[in-house]
Image (cartoon, rainbow, N blue to C red):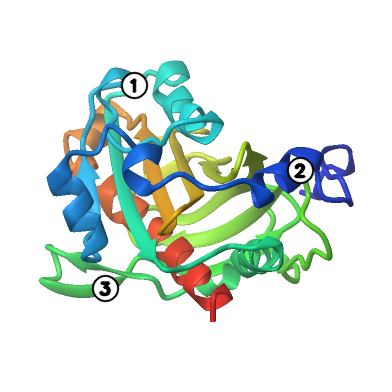
């Protein structure tokens, strides 16, 4: 699907300019729900994981509009499986140029190809996503070139194809939106996902949100996945583990792109 031109502003939005020049909060103030042990782990390079039962149990959303956007997912999408994650990149500062570079790097969706995970079934490292590329619309197979932006938009959305190690050919909507001083990335399946010829998830049955938030000491990245598996497949597959792997893969990809843009 084409990017909806009505949703894209060719100029920097006023709220982004204000946020870019504002003083960022320290990490512990930006995410006051984090325990001291969580802060210590984050600052030593660990990835935090949690399995909340709903919006009230979320641990990692930051204060402000970006955090509210993360909380909105379980508030509006009542499902049996939630996974959330957090990561911290110390010492990285995202000025306006680097923010644009991060978005363009993430629009190079082909780089999701080859992302790996630990497979219990294979007892080793396996490829999670492969053959990732941009397409015109869900269900299309013609490869489109990556988008390259000249200025930061208010928001945008595009369609991508990927081959999932468990669910085969899949089509997702990949979206970006500036919310307050954070960038919100969204990923939602726009075609049903199948497992062994059985319907695994309906359309929009897997929804991910990733927030990239500048803080005083660096960049905080928080993510959540909400999944609504079909009961038959949920009885065959550990959905918490399956969604954790996919959320961590997407979050890790985002973190890698931020690091690239900061060099």
In this orientation, which residue lies closer to the viewer: 231 or 86? 86
Query: What residue sits 80% from the left and 40% below the top?
Result: 14
Q: Residue furthest front?
A: 23
On the picture, is 116 further left or further right than 16?
A: left
Distance, label 1 to label 3, CA atoms, is 32 Å
Q: Which residue is mark 3?
A: 126
Which is in the foreground here, disc 1 or disc 3?
1
Query: What residue sits 58% from the left and 74% below the top?
Result: 261
Which is in the foreground here, disc 3 or disc 2?
2
Q: Which residue is mark 1?
A: 55
Choose top left, top right, bottom left or bottom right for residue 74. top left
Mark 2 nearby-residue class (10 Å; few <14, some 14–19, many ≥20): many
Choose top left, top right, bottom left or bottom right for residue 255. bottom left
Mark 3 nearby-residue class (10 Å; few <14, some 14–19, many ≥20): some
Q: Secondary structure at mark 3?
A: strand
On the picture, is 179 further left or further right than 5?
A: left
Q: Secondary structure at mark 1?
A: helix
In this orientation, which residue lies closer to the viewer: 236 or 28? 28
Marked residue nearer the N-terminal end (2 or 1): 1
Query: What residue sits 52% from the left and 42% below the top?
Result: 189
Position in image of residue 72 (x %, y %): 47, 23
Q: Which residue is mark 2?
A: 154
Distance, label 3 to label 2, CA atoms, is 36 Å
Are the two marked residues, 3 and 2, in contact with CB atoms closer than 8 angstroms? no
Marked residue nearer the N-terminal end (3 or 2): 3
Are the two marked residues, 1 and 3, in contact with CB atoms closer than 8 angstroms? no
Position in image of residue 124 (x %, y %): 15, 75
* Residue 75, label in figure: none
Q: Secondary structure at mark 2?
A: loop
Q: Is residue 117 above or below residue 114?
A: above
In this orientation, which residue lies closer to the viewer: 172 or 215? 215
Mark 1 nearby-residue class (10 Å; few <14, some 14–19, many ≥20): some
């Amino acid at each position: 699907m084409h990017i909806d031109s009505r949703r894209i502003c060719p100029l920097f939005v006023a709220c982004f300019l204000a946020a870019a020049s504002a003083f960022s909060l320290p990490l512990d103030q930006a995410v006051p729900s984090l325990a001291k042990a969580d802060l210590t782990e984050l600052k030593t390079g660990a990835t935090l994981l949690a399995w909340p039962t709903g919006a009230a149990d979320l641990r990692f959303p930051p204060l402000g509009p970006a955090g509210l956007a993360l909380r909105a997912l379980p508030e509006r999408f009542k499902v049996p499986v939630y996974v959330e994650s957090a990561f911290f990149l110390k010492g990285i500062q995202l000025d306006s140029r680097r923010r644009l570079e991060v978005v363009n790097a993430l629009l190079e969706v082909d780089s999701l190809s080859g992302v790996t995970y630990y497979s219990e079934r294979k007892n080793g490292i396996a490829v999670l996503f492969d053959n990732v590329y941009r397409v015109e619309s869900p269900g299309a197979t013609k490869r489109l070139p990556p988008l390259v932006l000249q200025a930061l938009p208010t928001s945008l959305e595009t369609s991508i194809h990927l081959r999932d190690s468990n669910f085969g050919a899949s089509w997702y909507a990949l979206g970006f939106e500036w919310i307050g001083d954070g960038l919100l990335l969204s990923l939602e399946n726009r075609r049903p996902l199948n497992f062994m010829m059985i319907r695994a998830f309906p359309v929009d049955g897997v929804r991910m949100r990733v927030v990239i938030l500048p803080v005083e000491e660096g960049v905080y990245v928080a993510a959540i996945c909400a999944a609504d598996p079909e009961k038959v497949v949920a009885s065959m597959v550990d959905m918490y583990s399956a969604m954790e792997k996919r959320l961590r893969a997407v979050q890790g990809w985002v973190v890698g792109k931020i690091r690239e843009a900061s060099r």
